[in-house]
Image: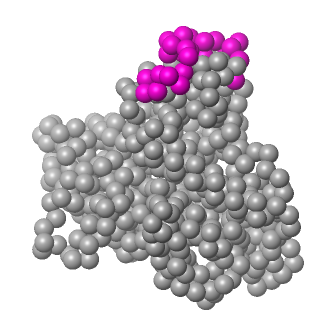
Amino acid sequence: MGAGPRGTGVLQRLGVQAQRRGTRLNVEVVDPFPAGAGRIWRRDQSPLLWMNSPMTAVSMFDGPDGLASLTAWAGTLSDGADPELLDDVGRSRDRRFASRPVAGAYLEWAFARAVHGVDRVRVHRDRVVDLTDGDGGEQLVHLADRPEPLRVDVVVLAQGHVDTAPDPATAAVGAHARMHGLYHRPPAHASQIDEADLPPGTDVLVRGLGLTFVDLVTLLTQGRGGRFADRGDGELEYLPSGREPVLHAGSRRGVPYRSKPGPALRADPPPLPCVLTPDALPPGPLDFRRHVLPSALREMIAGHYHELRHVHPRRTTVPWTEFRDRLRDPSEAVAALVGRAIPDPAHRFDPQLLADPLAGIGTGTEALQQRVRRHVARDLWRRHDPDAGAETGAIAGIGSALTTTLELVSAGRITAGSVRRDVEGSFLPFGSYLTSGPPGRRLRELLALSRAGVVRFLGPRLQVRPDGDSFRADGPALDRPVTARHLIDARLPPDDLGRSTDPLLVALRGRGEATADPGTGRLAIREPDHRMLLRDGRVHPRRFAVGPCVAGVAPPGRGPAGIDFFEVNDRVATELLDRVPHGAG
């Protein structure tokens, strides 16, 4: 159920393992969107929307099949291919980031390749509305447009991000907008917004400066005919079409996500984890903020120092092993240690400053615009100039800390309340802010849009509330509130089983055949086989679930959907085949 990247990945491993075992398989695939691409990567989107990972980092296949990456696939396209696709592929290669239509074409090809090894695959462009047990234990899959259910031995839920009802606060904003004739776009994936909803020149408040914000800005500027010109000094100039709204944007931190890193590590990978290890933590239940976060921040500092010490040794004064050992000592003051080891403050890495990049900013709207632009420009320099510093080491550190944290979550070591409040609510977004930002080109465009007055920054700790016949935005860096009749929540809705509107999950939840993980609110499964948990704590023997709506999802990594993408696909395929009668088909 679901034929996007995750469903395709499981299908591919099923085929490989079935061939090894000599097992014949018939597979029914259900997705209302194109198989392979799914909803997120479908080809009928604007080519202005890009993937967030470089083409060279995207592959649906591991091991010997690793050559079947997006880049390798693009190189096989012949002149007989769709001319529009070929043009888009060429532009994607030039900038290193594929458009969503190009990604969708690759994923559709990957699905066609993934079915090798499976005797029969039937694709149903339909939606699953229910799932019940047959008299003999077989699974009955009920589709919206098919009168008779599909009868199968085992099922995999791989629906990706599922739709959810708005939380109470968002629902209240929507109700106020309807009552007063205002415009409110709730959290959702980026999509084209009609000019009738946001006419040219309209003041629009935007909550959120992450990836959804970047996509929306692109659609509302270039998507309306604006374009960028190279000024000749490395900067861009925005040439407006006159059809753009004016976007007043802010967030918790007040700055956009950090740029996708440019150069890779120049030294050998730092030996991580070296601070945040399970044996270094106290026994018993853990509160993330108290027990884990201090070591996670030290892990980032360790990664940064390892890279700096080995690439720019003259910028440091302490040998790596001595620095590492001192960093492991919880009684060692980190600020003092870093100060001694890295004499020049310009070369230091401060995780606290990353968490609050506009700390100490005064009140003044114009000064705020300049401060944010300086921050973005410095970020681009640090991320793309190989001699600027050693932030790639810090990125390795946060990646290691995220992996260890999620292993602790999966093992039940961190309390449910702390998982929701601290891990899901703060640390994972912090990791995304540092490592999952947009391509550098997008931030250069944002600087040009800011200079042109099309984007106006509202600063950190943004507060937006309904105020009569408008919305009112306040923040500590604003010298006066900003009001508008249009509001966009530029973020994705969280995956929460309790508020899911997916008809299948609603039906299963209502009968107690699906339950929420207490820490994350996502669909609960049993690790490591990914079988679904029932409300009474039992495990369903024939139902599996994978993907972002499932508890225990790993941070972004080398696979399209997480650092454990290939490992999970293979593990689930093994478990599935163990439960299929030999020679089924």
Across and down, in percent, residue 188 comes to: 57, 66
Label tally: 0
Is 2 on the left or on the right of 172, as rendered? left
What residue appears at the point 59 percent right and 81 percent down from the top-left corner?
A: 244
Residue 312 belongs to magenta span: yes
Across and down, in percent, residue 426 comes to: 66, 42
Vertically, is 119 above or below 285? below
Across and down, in percent, residue 260 comes to: 47, 49
Span of residues in magenta:
309-335
Across and down, in percent, residue 213 comes to: 58, 64
Vertically, is 391 above or below 168? above
Vertically, is 435 above or below 109? above
What residue appears at the point 43 percent right and 40 percent down from the top-left corner?
A: 386
Q: Main secondary structure of the magenta part?
A: helix
What residue appears at the point 20 percent right and 57 percent down from the top-left corner?
A: 73
Residue 488 seen in this snapshot: no
Which picture quadrant has residue 446?
bottom right
Residue 167 belongs to magenta span: no
Vertically, is 455 above or below 540? below
Which picture quadrant has residue 41?
bottom left
Q: Nearer the viewer, residue 300 or 236?
A: 236
What residue appears at the point 62 percent right and 64 percent down from the top-left corner?
A: 490
Q: Nearer the viewer, residue 123 or 155?
A: 123
